[in-house]
């Protein structure tokens, strides 16, 4: 198993230093997106852990409205 410091960018081959921009990780050398912001994860709160009143009332917009 390789150590984290041995990780390399699959595009430019330089040692990988991730830079986080708007939720995705990109290579600090070439700027290529190497860790996408959304890989199928869902924005759903765990049961009993809803702290945002907008989510409890279903006011996050039509795409995330879980009230139905």
Image (tube, grey):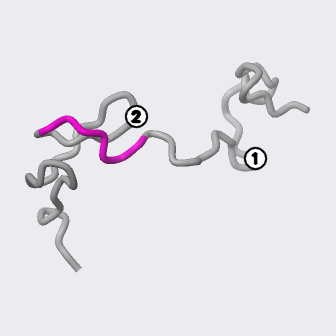
34 up-or-down from 21: above or below: below
Start and end of the magenta stretch? 30-36
At numbered mark 1, what does the secondary structure look like: helix, strand or loop? loop
Classify the position of the N terminus by image quarter.
bottom left
Q: Nearer the viewer, mark 2 or mark 1?
A: 2
At numbered mark 2, what does the secondary structure look like: helix, strand or loop? loop
- Report x, y in % for residue 31: 20, 35
Q: How far apart are marks 2 and 1 (CA)?
A: 26 Å
Residue shown at 64% from the left, 44% from the top: 42
Q: Residue at label 2? A: 23
Check if mark 2's residue and mark 1's residue have beta carbons within 8 Å: no
Instruction: Choose between 65 and 34: the one closer to the eye.
Output: 34
Residue 33 among magenta residues: yes
Instruction: Choose between 42 and 50: the one closer to the eye.
Output: 42
Q: In which quarter of the image is residue 53?
A: top right
- Report x, y in % for residue 47: 76, 49
* Tag shown at residue 31: none
Q: Residues within 10 Å of mark 2 (few under 14, many from 20)?
A: few
Residue shown at 21% from the left, 55% from the top: 10
* Tag shown at residue 48: 1
Q: Residues within 10 Å of mark 1 (few under 14, many from 20)?
A: few
Left or right: 49 in relation to 17: right
Left or right: 24 in relation to 11: right
Please tell me which of labels 2 and 1 falls first in the chain.
Answer: 2
The extreme front residue here reads 11
Left or right: 12 in relation to 53: left
- Report x, y in % for residue 22: 37, 28
Residue shown at 67% from the left, 34% from the top: 51
Q: How many marks?
A: 2
């Amino acid at each position: 198993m390789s150590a984290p410091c041995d990780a390399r960018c699959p595009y430019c081959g330089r040692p990988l230093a991730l830079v986080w921009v708007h939720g995705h990780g990109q290579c600090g050398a070439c700027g290529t997106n190497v860790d996408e912001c959304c890989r199928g994860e869902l924005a759903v709160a765990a049961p009993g852990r809803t702290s945002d009143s907008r989510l409890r009332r279903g006011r996050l917009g039509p795409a995330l409205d879980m009230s139905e």
